[in-house]
């Protein structure tokens, strides 16, 4: 059994895999809970984090498995230098690329090697990746939905912190009016529809690309888009699970 850990800016996901099969997944708001929650006896633990290094956590995880992988830029560059085919899609990646983005690109390239792709990941940030038949070309990063709401509250004097999930939970985002008539609807129009319009803009510019959506809000945005889009709910976790199988 392999344990996959994805520490993001907002929360941490931990998943147990038997080869490619995901058996279970848990989410923690505080990564400090990991040491008390993670058991022992795993074959491989793969850790991907977008936060700073934590040597004590690495040591604790390393003692609970046969093989520990700190999935970061240096690790990936070493695999590329050694000629590992699985990592060839990242030959063109820039310095500083986050572990979550790399894992998503690897998995998307593995799943759709003959397609030109647009991969949207809805997390703390909204990321867009361009992949041409298994070869990473470049990408874009903008604010994620929750961050947009928090930034507006933090950097203005009179906008309170509102919850976009309260709007998303009501259903189809196409029912949101582009013209807001109060604060809540204006925020929904500018931010929720703003992300939708952002996606649609990329789709219009690159109509021949296959569109992949991942991340927590992927189903909501997929339902509000016209055209053929594919949801890969666990793209990052599945990519990290593949890393465990490649060594």
Image (cartoon, rainbow, N blue to C red):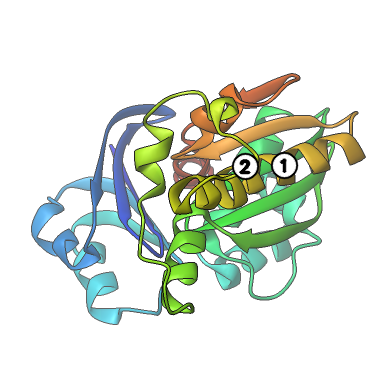
Q: Nearer the viewer, residue 120 or 32?
A: 120
**Residue tagged 1:** 197
Tell me where residue 108 sits by quadrant. top right
**Residue tagged 2:** 193
Q: Is residue 54 above or below residue 145?
A: below
Q: Is residue 241 left or right of residue 86?
A: left
Q: Residue at x 57, y 32 (%)?
A: 221
Q: Residue at x 66, y 29 (%)?
A: 111
Q: Is residue 23 left or right of residue 113?
A: left
Assess disc 2: are there few (<14), some (14-19) or many (≥20) residues with their C-alpha within 10 Å of its C-alpha: some
Tell me where residue 8 sits by quadrant. bottom left
Residue 165, numbered label: none
For the residues labelled 1 and 2, the Cα–Cα distance comes to 6 Å
Q: Is residue 93 above or below residue 189?
A: below
Count of numbered circles in the view: 2
Q: Nearer the viewer, residue 200 or 139?
A: 200
Mark 1 and mark 2 in contact? Answer it, CB < 8 Å. Answer: yes
Assess disc 1: are there few (<14), some (14-19) or many (≥20) residues with their C-alpha within 10 Å of its C-alpha: some
Q: Residue at x 74, y 70 (%)?
A: 94
Instruction: Using the rendered image of the protein, determine whether residue 232 is visible from the camera's viewpoint.
Output: no
Q: Is residue 172 left or right of residue 202?
A: left
Tell me where residue 120 sits by quadrant. top right
Q: Is residue 227 left or right of residue 190?
A: right
Q: Residue at x 43, y 79 (%)?
A: 157
State the image coordinates of residue 26 (x, y, percent, origin top left): 24, 42
Q: Is residue 73 above or below residue 169?
A: below
Secondary structure of the residue carrying tag 2 is helix
């Amino acid at each position: 059994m392999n344990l996959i850990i994805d520490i993001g800016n907002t929360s941490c996901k931990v998943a147990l895999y038997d080869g490619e099969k995901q058996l279970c997944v848990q989410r923690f708001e505080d990564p400090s809970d990991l040491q008390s929650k993670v058991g022992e006896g795993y074959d491989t633990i793969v850790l991907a984090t977008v936060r700073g290094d934590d040597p004590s956590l690495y040591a604790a995880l390393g003692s609970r498995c046969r093989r520990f992988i700190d999935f970061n830029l240096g690790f990936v560059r070493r695999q590329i230098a050694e000629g590992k085919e699985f990592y060839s899609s990242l030959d063109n990646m820039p310095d500083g690329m986050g572990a979550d983005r790399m894992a998503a690109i690897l998995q998307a390239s593995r799943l759709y090697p003959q397609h030109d792709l647009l991969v949207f990941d809805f997390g703390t940030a909204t990321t867009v990746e361009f992949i041409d038949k298994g070869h990473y070309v470049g990408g874009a990063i903008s604010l994620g939905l929750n961050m947009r709401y928090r930034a507006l509250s933090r950097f203005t004097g009179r906008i309170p912190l509102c919850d976009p999930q309260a709007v998303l939970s009501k259903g189809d985002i196409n029912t949101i009016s582009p013209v807001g008539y109060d604060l809540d609807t204006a925020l929904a129009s500018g931010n929720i529809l703003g992300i939708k319009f952002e996606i649609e803009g990329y789709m219009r510019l690159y109509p021949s690309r296959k569109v992949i959506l991942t991340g927590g809000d992927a189903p909501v945005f997929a339902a509000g888009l016209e055209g053929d889009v594919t949801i890969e709910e666990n793209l990052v976790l599945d990519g990290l699970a593949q890393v465990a199988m490649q060594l």
